[in-house]
Image (spheres, rainbow, N blue to C red):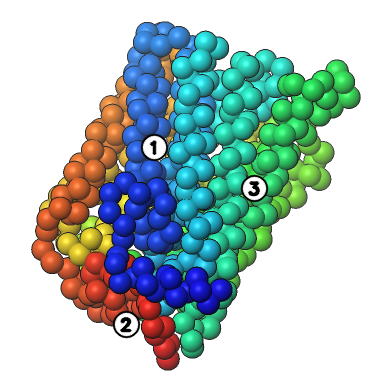
Amino acid sequence: MSTVVETHDHDGHHGPAKGLTRWLFTTNHKDIGTLYLWFSFIMLFIGGGMAMVIRAELFQPGLQIVQPEFFNQMTTNHGLIMVFGVIMPAFVGLANWMIPMQIGAPDMALPRLNNLSFWLLPMAFGILISTLFMPEGGPNFGWTFYAPLSTTYAPSTVNFFIFSVHVMGVSSILGSINIITTIFNMRAPGMTLMKMPLFVWSWLITAYLLIAVMPVLAGVVTMMLMDINFGTSFFNAAGGGDPVLFQHVFWFFGHPEVYIMILPAFGIVSHIIETFSRKPIFGYSSMVYAMASIAILSFVVWAHHMFTVGMPLAGELFFMYSTMLIAIPTGVKVFNWVATMFRGSLTFETPMLFSIGFVTLFTIGGFSGLMLAIVPADFQYHDTYFVVAHFHYVLVPGALFGIIAGAYYWLPKWTGNMYDETLGKLHFWLTFISVNITFFPMHFVGLAGMPRRYPDYALQFADFNAMISVGAFMFGITQLLFLFIVIKTIRSGKQAKPEVWEGAGDLGLEWTLSSPPPYHSFTVQPEVK
């Protein structure tokens, strides 16, 4: 071990390698964080392009632009890419960049594993996207890939999709092991668990969730593989299987997964709100306990996605109540964010705007979730656009706003340059308005009975759909402005101070480093009082 450390230090004097090899073989947490973030950004535009195809088709009633089969491939791949290729890699990128700097460590605990975790992703998504160019086309059974649609009636490319999901899962598990090991073994002396920054806490909890549920996903896709290729009938009723079993196993992974996609955002937003309120976060320990409670409860709510499959009444009641219960720790978090802002010296820089947007719109998404939790009501809402409205309000103004807020908040630290505040605010307002124009009307068309995942619809929904599509295109184009802001910040901008934000110096170890930080963050561990 000692030899490794010595060579590592020796490299530290040289800084990063030159050229392409730096990015291929890097074991540095900052480089790998950057790779993850750029990968996620590229995928955002690919997945967003697919959403644009969906919304262009739905701009008017009638089948206009694409074939229904291709429309289904777009909805499926849009979901898969946004969940596994945008939100999750972006959070892992932020974790790679920030966790070592926040806990006072020189790097991640397992640097080579870190490199592998990243390079598995381009391979996985290369395989997934390549299916679109095969004769039978890509997966067309929705991102939840319910059997028998994804087994008996699927195109043969489903095998590529299964392999790609396996590879994504391996990447997530390896990344999580690395994060847990880093947090437990490499904290600065004096930093007890209850002194850790909330972002570190949120990722510690998320990493455990990932290790718990990714094998379940691997299990369910392997059962699919067997059903398709080896004559088993896990999900085939004719052979003694059960298609509902698929839904149970999938959502046992799928529901913790949606909390995996939001918990790191909770951590980021907590930091931003305390920075721009100029006071420490209200109720630190209750925030930690709330995150842990959400994570534990996330394992007992999965069947709320399946109220209409014919479960016993006792089952429906259990899942209804457990789903409502999860609203309590989430409510605690919202209360604490509002209490932190209450009577604080607020300023509204771009990260803060995105964080306030996050808190307000995420709460709306939470309330529509509570509506969906009511079993008799869910019979009306199930498989309508109301559900689409609900989860997009949680995932776009929730997870994505959290990521964008984190990017603006730490970008000056990463690059050493301040971003353009005027452009940042323009990006926020255009995004905020377009998100609401896109997703708010979906509640109405859903309540009026418009089903999801259809390439066509009845005439009465035409006006709202035209509005939704305009909002979606506005949202998509606005993100090009974000790309411009990021590139502009990397290349030029006012020199950023070490603490970047007024008063941030007291709020975490990352602000004690220079902007941009040295290639190896803390070669001498700081002491935490």
- Please name the amino acid that badge 1 sits on: Met
Q: Can residue 181 be seen?
A: yes
Q: Which mark is residue 182?
A: none
Residue 401 in the image: x percent, y percent? 36, 51
Label 3 and label 1: CA atoms lie apart by 21 Å
Neighbor class of circle 1 (other Cα within 10 Å; few <14, some 14-19, many 20+) is many
Q: Residue at x 23, y 45 (%)?
A: 482
Mark 1 element type: helix
From the viewer's perspective, is 314 left or right of 94?
A: right
Label 1 and label 2: CA atoms lie apart by 36 Å
Quarter of the image with the C terminus in it: bottom left
Mark 2 element type: helix
Q: Which residue is mark 1?
A: 43
Sequence order check: which comes first, mark 2 or mark 3? 3
Q: Residue at x 39, y 26 (%)?
A: 50
Sequence order check: which comes first, mark 3 or mark 1? 1
Residue 447 in the image: above or below residue 291: above
State which quadrant residue 383 falls in: top right
Label 2 and label 3: CA atoms lie apart by 37 Å
From the viewer's perspective, is 119 left or right of 403?
A: right
Q: Which residue is mark 3?
A: 214
